[in-house]
Image (cartoon, helix red, strand yellow):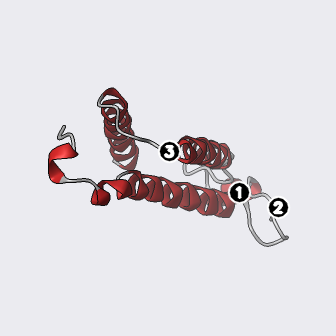
Amino acid sequence: FLGVSIINMLIYFIYYLILKIKHKEKIKKIFFVWILIDLSIISLSLVFFLKTSTNIFLTIEESNELNHSCVLFNYFDYHDIWHILSSTGLFIFINIVYFLDKNLNELVDEEISVF
């Protein structure tokens, strides 16, 4: 469910960006930089997500043998790093969406394209 929701959100975001470009609304270059930063953080979080340290199809003893030692500051394992990176990536994405239309407050209603 979470994956479908995120894909749906990305489709609508890309659609919205395309319409903003099509209607020649101003988009600052810094947003594209932040989108690249966000994509790199999300991609890195997916790498740590795929480095699983458990297997639900094994017995508890066999699954525990898959556990890795802590890799970051001798405290965080791969699953913790995935949580940190994915939450950071989602926070940056929410800020991108929020600040993308922040300049519309300065325009007159008739100047804003409705799509």
Camera-side residue: 11 or 37?
37
Q: Position of residue 108 (x, y in %)?
A: 20, 53
Camera-side residue: 53 or 74?
74
- Which residue: 40% across, 51% down? 100
Under circle 2, the secondary element is loop
Q: Residues within 10 Å of mark 2 (few under 14, many from 20)?
A: few
Q: Amino acid at mark 3?
A: Lys
Q: Which mark is residue 28?
A: 3
Q: Position of residue 92 (x, y in %)?
A: 52, 57
> What is the C-alpha distance between the residues marked 3 and 2?
38 Å
Camera-side residue: 11 or 35?
35
Q: Are marks 1 and 3 in contact (CB under 8 Å)?
A: no
| 95 displayed left or right of 44 | left
Which numbered mark, 1 or 3, is in the foreground of this view?
A: 3
Q: Position of residue 105 (x, y in %)?
A: 29, 60
What residue is disc 2 on? 71
Q: Residues within 10 Å of mark 3 (few under 14, many from 20)?
A: few
Q: Classify the position of the C terminus by image quarter.
A: top left
Q: Quadrant of residue 39?
A: top right
> What is the C-alpha distance between the residues marked 2 and 1?
7 Å
Is residue 13 placed above or below 22 in the rendered structure? below
What residue is disc 1 on? 78
- Which residue: 17% across, 41% down? 114
| 17 displayed left or right of 71 | left
Under circle 1, the secondary element is helix
